[in-house]
Image (cartoon, grey):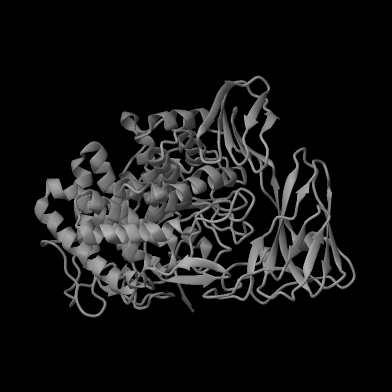
Amino acid sequence: MTVSRRAVLGGSLAVAASSGLPAATAAAGPVSGAAGGSAGGSAGGRLVNLAHLDFLGDSVSPPAVAGHSSYGTGPLGVLWTYADRRADGSYARIGGGPYDAATNTYGQGAFNADDIARAAVVYLRHYRAHRDAHSRSAAYGLLRGLAYLQTTSGPNAGNVVLWMQPDGQLNPSAEPVELPDPSDSGPSYWLARTVWALGEGYEVFRTVDPAFARFLRSRLELALDALDRQVLVRYGSWNIVDGRRVPAWLIVAGADATSEAVLGLSAYVRAGADRRARRALARFAEAVAAMGAGGIREWPFRALLPWGESISIWHAWGAQMPSALAVASTVLGDRRLLPPALGDTAGFTPLLLTAGGPDNGWLSAPVDRTQIAYGVDARLQGLLNVATAANRPGLRQVAAFVAAWYFGANRAGEPMYDATTGRTYDGISGDGVINRNSGAESTIHGLLSMLALDANPAVTRQVDALTPTRPVLSGLQVVEAESAQLSSGAAVVTPPSAWTGESQWSNGSYVALPAGSQAEWTLPSVAEPRLVLPVVDLVPDRTAGRSTWSTGGVIDHGSGGPQGVSAAFGALLPVAAGVLPAAETTLTARSTGPEVRVDALLLLPLISRLQLGSDELLVSVDRHPRSVPVAQRGIAYSYTASGVLHSRRPVTGRAEVLPGGFTVVLT
């Protein structure tokens, strides 16, 4: 089976099997101490601790291969992909895919360009913050290793090989196969991340090692050559995805991948790149900005969508879009990039937090509730960067609610980052089970978050006040359609695959309602009115049926747009069907016309809440200002839908929440 890195949303949590691990790769890290439950920091008062990232590092002297070279001489810096936790608490470095002891190779490889590039960014940012000689040296080594993975000649010049074996041999066609295959045969996530690392590397080394910086610049220009001929050649062209216009010049059709290239190009332009790089930055940022969608009550609730081939998917991992737009806005002096970034950070992210946090996948129902550091870091970086670029300091208060995830404010109720070792665990499952492995990706994004928190001490102080505590939530609820009482003719349908090609049936099933049939759901009673958003299969067929809801809403299931480049006919989308009054526990839907399909119900309180300790985040999808009861005493900061501070008042039992806005209550 061939897959892309997007294909399995939970893939970032998966760790390759380690059976048959060779002694050379089983080097164990120190036994972990207890992970602290606050953001108090490691030695010296800093949260960031590079020890585990250093442990994952290695060096290799690869064999000579045509079209692959690097700067200078000597071994190249690389990074092991995974770190398995052993029974004694130690960690062993391993590669990806099945291990073959006879050849000392993995099905994928030991080292990969994605993680090498992002680890280089960690060391570069640490060097910029602290002028640390070790970080500078580590970044230098990893950038040399990354450059070797870039193909320098032939039709694929500028592209990047993803995997390398323990002895330095390149593995351009890994098992399982990933697209593109071979991995340097087209644009890719790893090409985008290479641009990120080269851009930030050039910005640092141009003053401390001009000769090396010139080399990095030549490799970045080579990457731009590839992007120009493979991606930006489509600039100005648009695809249709279920009726929505989507830019055709996103890297691998991903705003997520493109956003990471934008971060690197922003650093490159900031450091004095020429007009070509500035033009590429502007065009890629324009494409990312075009992915903002929805409204206060309309899917995806002002989020920036990550994938240019589906309007039904949002995922937390890699969703660096608001950060990229904020940074590019500042570098380019283009404030037109900020409104979609504000919608994502001031609108969607607070709702996401009250719904349980940065889940791996909403498709459109939140079907993958795994949470990983990559997704948490993307939310944190977005809030902090947009707060600075748009002058919205209130977003830093929201950022503290995100960052608290690392220190125990998560569904497991336990810390995910240990400042005494520098480890970030590989994720938390939807039912609160921690994967205590600590691979490269989680380590990298945990450290990027810690660097950001170290640079924002006020946010860190707020995090200390929020943790350790489990979140108390009153937000989005999901009710499976098949939990309804069905009238004669209605049926639960389980298709052969839950994956539709561009989205996924929640719980793997849906309810089919032929004309005249009815579904009735019994719901838990809550004190807050709830917006009812059935997730239905909208198709571009004006003869399709309708569903009438007891909340007064009528959904036209044939109102979908033309399929375009989407892989499936129709799209699973939440559609507002009215408001369920407070304490109401019965909801019904009746079909008229041809059969309609209902996947799940999203029930969104008009005022959602997240409580961590004695502090609260309140979020509104109401159309009117609301004064709502608050148990804690403190200060209520009330913000508009675009994150502008509206009022700052002592709490006297109630707090004001504006339409589409959020309120932070700090005690």
Q: Residue furthest right?
A: 488
Looking at the rendering, in which quadrant would you find the C terminus?
A: top right
Residue occupying the point 34% across, 78% down = 182
- Percent across and percent down for residue 274 are 19, 57
Q: Quadrant of residue 108?
A: bottom left
Residues 491 and 560: in front is 560
Residue 583, placed above or below residue 653: below
Residue 130, placed above or below residue 532: above
Residue 116 visible? The answer is no
- Is 337 placed left or right of 144 in the picture? right
Residues 240 and 314: in front is 240
Residue 513, placed above or below residue 459: below
Q: Quadrant of residue 454?
A: top left
- Percent across and percent down for residue 527 are 77, 37
- Is 153 placed left or right of 72 in the picture? right
Residues 487 and 127: in front is 487
Residue 138, placed above or below residue 35: below
- Percent across and percent down for residue 556 are 73, 66
